[in-house]
């Protein structure tokens, strides 16, 4: 029987390629696995560089670096990838890598090269040179498209990537997409700007945003928002890119305050609440906010503690009647003692209420990706003459792709593997060594939300409706 060869699998896709060509990591995984099975190979490790350009230096590609280190340790004899341009789009970086991984060889699943001959090595260099040139040309074309969009007031990204207070709209005159004020968020942003200019404190503004609107802003996030030129309607040199919140002079005053050395982040003064954003009010469903409570011991000593309360009940005119305060130590104790039991219950409930059934999809992802490939090939080869035609067809296909992904997400099975992975072995011992920031990150890494049930006897408090990642 032929010896099973130990191989490494390397896959890469840049953010640009995902957007333009619909290239995915999953598709590469499938092709490489099929090739390995067919050729009596065992994949000992997968290396996945997602959102990484093939033009990047080796030192800026973390998974490639890890693969090179493993090659130097002799973990495998061969590297698999689907095409040479998945490995590199730079001649110089390719040869640097080859020096470091020798005597490990490589193979592609979609192309054939004979590296034992001069002609074969020349072909590899030619392919890399062409790939390098195509990457440059694609980048130049995308830059042209983006410059055109910015100059005509069109969005370069979707609503979810725009600054707070803005969204993608549609120009009633020409039917093209544009950037408009978000009608839901505009009054909030205007209020936050006015409040910040009055108090001149990011920390106070963050607390104000959370207590009044239940919005969680970070220090840097708020600083970047207030410095964004779109607040006065300008973007990429277009002074009339979008509807402004402020005139330029007022925005310059805002930025002067925002960038002043007297404006301190005060991050050291902020307290870390372990379950901030995770606890939901069982009555109104809104997030419960963390605060500091104080009490005086019989010996006269003042004692402070962290607690959670429904902010709607305490700061919104009593619109919610849930007036209980939750000690953070109590919530933490319940989670440490019962989280594995809660997880088991969530799995059992999911299995009972989510029996599999057949689903017919309206959109075919593979067909849409194929159309995107054809469209972008025509654009690169100059077969599409105008930016407007390319943009119109590309937007239509991307809309279809978003709908296709959305209808699949509706029926995607729940995966509890993240929680299972974390709650293994001596996880409680590890947890006990974490600082408050680490503990907060620990819970947020696998819990989405939970509700308190404090209505039973004093010693029978529990947490319910826990949603796990």
Image: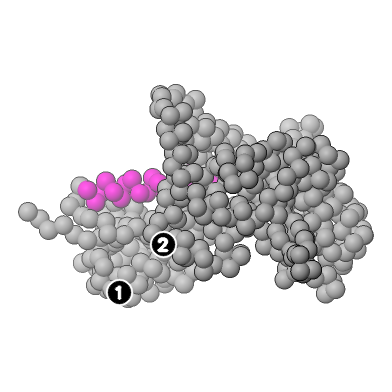
Name the residue nearer the viewer: 15 or 370.
15
- 223 relative to 362, above or below: below
Whether 462 is drawn above or below 207: the answer is above
Residue 101 shown left or right of residue 417 in the figure: left
Q: Which residue is found at the position 22% from the left and 61% from the top?
A: 6
Residue sitting at x 41%, y 69%: 65
Q: Position of residue 119 (x, y in %)?
A: 26, 64
- Furthest-left residue in view? 1
Question: Which region of the structure is painted magenta?
Answer: 18-37
**Circle 2: element type:** loop
Residue pointed to by mark 2: 426
Q: Residue at x 32, y 46 (%)?
A: 31
Check if residue 36 falls in the magenta segment.
yes
Q: Is residue 50 in view from this perspective?
A: yes
Disc 1/disc 2 C-alpha distance (Å): 33 Å
Residue 1 x, y percent position in the rendering:
7, 54
Q: Nearer the viewer, residue 301 or 375?
A: 301
In-image side of 278 versus 226 (left or right): left
Magenta-colored stretch includes residue 455: no
Q: Provide residue 176's location: percent of width, then percent of height.
A: 72, 36
Label located before the other in sequence (1 or 2): 1
Q: Which mark is residue 174?
A: none
Label 1 sits on residue: 72
Q: Mark 1: which secondary structure?
A: helix
Report the side of 174 relative to 415 (left or right): right
């Amino acid at each position: 029987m032929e010896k099973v060869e130990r191989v490494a699998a390397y896959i890469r896709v840049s953010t640009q390629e995902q957007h333009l060509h619909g290239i995915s990591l999953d598709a590469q995984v499938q092709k490489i696995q099929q090739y390995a099975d067919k050729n009596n190979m065992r994949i000992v490790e997968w290396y996945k560089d997602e959102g990484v350009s093939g033009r990047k230096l080796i030192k800026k590609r973390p998974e490639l670096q890890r693969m090179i280190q493993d090659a130097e340790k002799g973990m495998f004899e061969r590297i698999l990838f689907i095409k040479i341009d998945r490995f590199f789009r730079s001649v110089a970086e390719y040869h640097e890598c080859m020096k470091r991984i020798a005597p490990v060889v490589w193979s592609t699943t979609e192309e054939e090269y004979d590296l034992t001959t001069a002609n074969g090595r020349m072909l590899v260099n030619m392919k890399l040179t062409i790939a390098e040139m195509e990457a440059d040309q694609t980048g130049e074309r995308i830059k042209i498209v983006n410059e055109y969009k910015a100059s005509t007031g069109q969005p370069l990204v979707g609503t979810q990537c725009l600054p707070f207070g803005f969204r993608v709209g549609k120009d009633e005159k020409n039917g093209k997409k544009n950037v408009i004020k978000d009608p839901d968020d505009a009054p909030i942003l205007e209020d936050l700007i006015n409040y910040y200019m009055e108090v001149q404190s990011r920390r106070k503004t963050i607390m104000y945003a959370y207590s009044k609107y239940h919005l969680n802003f970070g220090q840097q996030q708020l600083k970047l928002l207030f410095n964004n030129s779109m607040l006065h309607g300008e973007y990429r040199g277009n002074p009339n890119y979008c509807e402004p919140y402020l005139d330029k002079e007022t925005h310059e005053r805002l930025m002067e305050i925002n960038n002043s050395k007297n404006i301190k982040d005060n991050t050291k003064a902020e307290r870390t609440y372990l379950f901030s954003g995770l606890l939901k009010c069982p009555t109104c469903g809104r997030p419960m906010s963390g605060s500091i409570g104080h009490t005086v011991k019989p010996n006269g000593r003042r004692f402070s503690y962290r607690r959670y309360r429904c902010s709607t009940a305490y700061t919104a005119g009593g619109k919610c009647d849930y007036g209980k305060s939750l000690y953070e130590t109590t919530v933490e104790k319940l989670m440490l003692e019962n989280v594995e039991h809660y997880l088991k219950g969530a799995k059992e409930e999911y299995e009972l209420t989510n029996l599999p059934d057949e689903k017919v999809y309206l959109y075919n992802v593979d067909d849409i990706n194929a159309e995107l490939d054809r469209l972008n090939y025509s654009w690169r080869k100059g077969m599409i003459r105008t930016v407007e035609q390319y943009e119109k067809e590309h937007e239509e296909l991307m809309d279809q792709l978003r709908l296709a992904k959305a209808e699949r997400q509706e029926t995607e099975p729940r995966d509890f593997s993240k929680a299972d992975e974390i709650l293994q072995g001596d996880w409680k011992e590890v947890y006990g060594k974490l600082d408050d920031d680490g503990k907060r990150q620990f819970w947020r890494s696998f819990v989405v939300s939970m509700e308190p049930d404090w209505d039973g006897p004093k010693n029978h408090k529990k947490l319910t409706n826990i949603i796990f990642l």
